Amino acid sequence: MSVTSTTVPSKTPEQGRPDRNRSTGSRPAPRRGRRVEPIFYLFLLPSLVLFTLAITVPGIVGIFFSFTNSIGIGDWEFVGLTNYIAIFSDPAILQSYLFTFGFSIVTVIAVNVIAFLLAVGLTSRIRMKSALRTIFVIPMVVSGIIIAYVFNFLFSNSLPSLGTAAGIPWLENSLLANPDLAWIAVVVVTAWQAVPGSLLIYIAGLVAVPGDVYEAAELDGAGKVQQLWRITLPLVAGYVVINVILGFKGFLNAYDIIVGLTNGGPGTSTRSIAMTVITGFNGGDYAYQMANATIFFLVAVVISLVQLSLTRGRSAL
């Protein structure tokens, strides 16, 4: 009886060597990033050239002329920081900054409160939600200057006539003619147009909140008000931050509604920074207002950096 011998294959050095990644638990080396195809740079080039020629180059030229006494045409000479020093002692410029920042803060608060409450109502179990959302979004698609002229007629004619007929003294005179109250009209009209944009963002945030959270809260005995304060607001905090910062930056550039509503009046009580700069350009104060625009640009950069620091790494919920 013969015995068949079985030959055991010898292990190669590679087979006999233990897997280093498995034994040590270390991760494999990360892959190198994929090479960007040249075609992408080709598509980027036209936009980059247009942005440089339309925004970057004019901005640099404007900053350069802010150190001169140029009126926009003709000869000029360097004056150093004279324009910048004069701005900080100019009451008209300081008034425009005070009005713009005060108007922006009040409008941001009004817009976000109204938009959030509307979003809560339009995402609840009510009838005709789609139709109501469409109606509330309409002001966003109408031109600001048209809205301003319509409200100008209402504040100047309709409301005073209504106040006279109803015997309401404070409505008999137009708000636009009162230097202490004209800013309220500007806030009302600006908020009326800005609410739809914030409303859409809040609706997106509220729809993304899981319904199980509210069901669990109801089982625990939480009422609607408690759910609003302790569940809804914390979960949409990221959307609140985005709306506040984007709204504030947008209101700092307010121009068309103010022009159509008050034209900066009465006097200069409702003149914004943007309106002051453009009016100065038309009046021959090119270099002076360019210095003003440069300061305003630096303020916008600081606000943008604050926005990035507040929204970096913030998730949707």
Image (cartoon, rainbow, N blue to C red):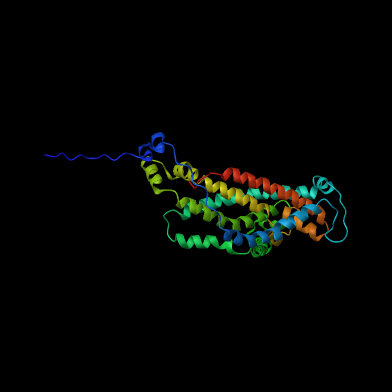
- The residue positioned 41% from the left and 48% from the top of the image is 210
Visible residue check, residue 266: no
- Image quarter where the N terminus lies is top left
Which x, y percent locates residue 58?
Answer: 74, 58
Say how many tags the image has.
Answer: 0
Visible residue check, residue 80: yes
Which x, y percent locates residue 187?
Answer: 65, 53
Nearer-the-camera pick, 138 or 11: 11
Residue sitting farthest toward the left: 1
- The residue positioned 57% from the left and 59% from the top of the image is 40
Q: Quadrant of residue 3?
A: top left
Nearer-the-camera pick, 238 or 264: 238
Does residue 118 lie above or below 24 as drawn? below
Q: Quadrant of residue 285?
A: bottom right
- The residue positioned 53% from the left and 46% from the top of the image is 238
The answer to whether residue 109 is left or right of residue 59 is: left
Does residue 184 lie above or below 50 as drawn? above
Q: Quadrant of residue 24?
A: top left
The answer to whether residue 81 is left or right of residue 58 is: right
Which x, y percent locates residue 200?
Answer: 52, 56
- The residue positioned 64% from the left and 60% from the top of the image is 45
Which x, y percent locates residue 304?
Answer: 64, 47
Residue sitting farthest toward the top: 24
The answer to whether residue 28 is left or right of residue 181 is: left
